[in-house]
């Protein structure tokens, strides 16, 4: 047996990165990224009617609310410095059609909610989703042909009408989440034609066909409509990364002001690539399934809910996101206020 000797250790480490980790003040001093309330966008589920409150079973702590019940939530956003609320409508089954035409109704739930909220909270930013899934009997984001295939250009007609009624109602940001080709350009052209030059577009540019949207489809009541259907013929394949850059490039060229990657935590590599490549305002959506996972683990006592929430949100910033759409927005903002 050959005798083997480890080389002698130097008397001390050449560098001691732990020096800066020893005390809270140095950790704070050298911290590269931080989370603030102004980084957060709160998605909310809006019901028609008065005095309506429904729990979303798969999203503990999240409720569907009628407008009157939403006002205190908007008020808290303002108080805590959460700059934007994102509205998702829960549409009455009787109003759903194969062509989702209710989406373009100027007196529909979304335009009414926008007008009422802007009236009471003019300083709170509002974002509305542009996609047909809450409005269609089949739960797809667009119109379908006989085979169930989602028609692109025909869908654009309805989407532009939807974006237009939202913009005319006074929404600050329209956010197309439908993944049709050319929708950003089509929407921008219609807005410009109508001289709605201030309406911002946040494009769901890299939106993946993800299993993590399950609880959201419960919340807006599109899950039953979608049934065994999926959105793989328009949302992106989770195996792709270069394709996300191509989608973002197209959306910027077509007139998007901000771009988004969705889902969030499993796609932080995409956030980083998008930010590095384009240097435009980049957002990530921590989706319903991510929220449900963290909540479920916390409720079981398997994770420290608050600590894991704050860590996950900070990770979005570190990955390059300028902001995060998250159901935790108010909880995190309250926590930041205490800190
Ligand atoms: C609708 C839309 C979805 C989400 C946001 N807008 C669902 C989907 O594409 O099926 C998901 C949000 C979430 O899961 O939190 N186009």
Image (cartoon, rainbow, N blue to C red):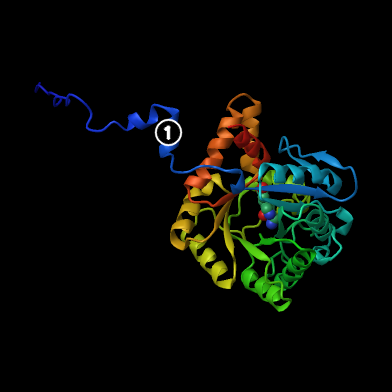
In the image: residue 22, left or right of residue 299: left
Check the image and name the residue furthest to the bottom. Answer: 193
Tally of marks:
1
**Residue at 48 percent of width and 57 percent of height:** 275
Q: Nearer the viewer, residue 178 or 138?
A: 178
Question: Where is the N terminus found, in terms of image quarters?
Answer: top left
At numbered mark 1, what does the secondary structure look like: helix, strand or loop?
helix
Examine the rendering and report whether any part of residue 327 can be seen.
no
Vertical comparison of 145 with 29: above or below: below
Vertical comparison of 26 with 37: above or below: above
Residue 89 image point, x, y percent: 79, 53
Question: Where is the C terminus found, in terms of image quarters?
Answer: top right
**Label 1 CA crowd tier, 10 Å (few <14, some 14–19, many 20+):** few
In the image: residue 297, left or right of residue 10: right
Disc 1 designates what residue? 27
**Residue at 80 percent of width and 53 percent of height:** 117
Residue 148 image point, x, y percent: 72, 64
Residue 108 image point, x, y percent: 85, 60
**Residue at 54 percent of width and 58 percent of height:** 281
Residue 115 image point, x, y percent: 82, 59
Check the image and name the residue furthest to the left. Answer: 2
Does mark 1's beta carbon lie closer than 8 Å to ligand 1?
no
């Amino acid at each position: 047996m050959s005798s083997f000797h480890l080389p002698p250790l130097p008397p001390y480490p050449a560098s001691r990165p732990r020096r800066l980790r020893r005390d809270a003040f140095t950790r704070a001093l050298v911290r590269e990224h931080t989370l603030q309330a102004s980084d957060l966008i709160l998605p909310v589920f809006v019901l028609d009617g008065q005095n309506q409150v429904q729990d979303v079973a798969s999203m503990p702590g999240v409720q569907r609310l009628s407008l009157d019940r939403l006002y205190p939530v908007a008020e808290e956003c303002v108080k805590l410095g959460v700059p934007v609320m994102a509205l998702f409508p829960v549409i009455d089954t009787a109003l759903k059609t194969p062509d989702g035409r209710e989406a373009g109704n100027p007196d529909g739930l979304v335009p009414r909610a926008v007008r009422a909220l802007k009236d009471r909270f003019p300083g709170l930013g509002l974002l509305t989703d542009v996609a047909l899934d809450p409005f269609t009997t089949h739960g797809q984001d667009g119109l379908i042909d006989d085979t169930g295939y989602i028609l692109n250009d025909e869908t654009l007609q309805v989407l532009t009408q939807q974006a237009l009624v939202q913009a005319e109602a006074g929404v600050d940001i329209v956010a197309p989440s439908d993944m049709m080709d050319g929708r950003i350009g089509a929407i921008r052209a219609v807005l410009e034609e109508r001289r709605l030059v201030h309406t911002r577009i946040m494009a769901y540019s890299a939106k993946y066909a993800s299993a993590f949207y399950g609880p959201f489809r419960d919340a807006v009541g599109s899950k039953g409509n979608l049934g065994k259907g999926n959105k793989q013929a328009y949302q992106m394949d989770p195996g792709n990364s270069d394709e996300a850059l191509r989608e973002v490039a197209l959306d910027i060229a077509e007139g998007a002001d901000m771009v988004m990657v969705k889902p969030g935590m499993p796609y932080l590599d995409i956030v980083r690539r998008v930010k590095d490549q384009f240097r435009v305002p980049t957002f990530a959506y921590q989706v319903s399934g991510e929220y449900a996972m963290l909540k479920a683990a916390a409720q079981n006592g398997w994770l420290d809910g608050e600590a894991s929430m704050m860590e996950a949100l900070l990770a979005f910033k570190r990955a390059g996101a300028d902001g995060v759409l998250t159901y935790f927005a108010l909880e995190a903002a309250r926590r930041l206020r205490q800190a």
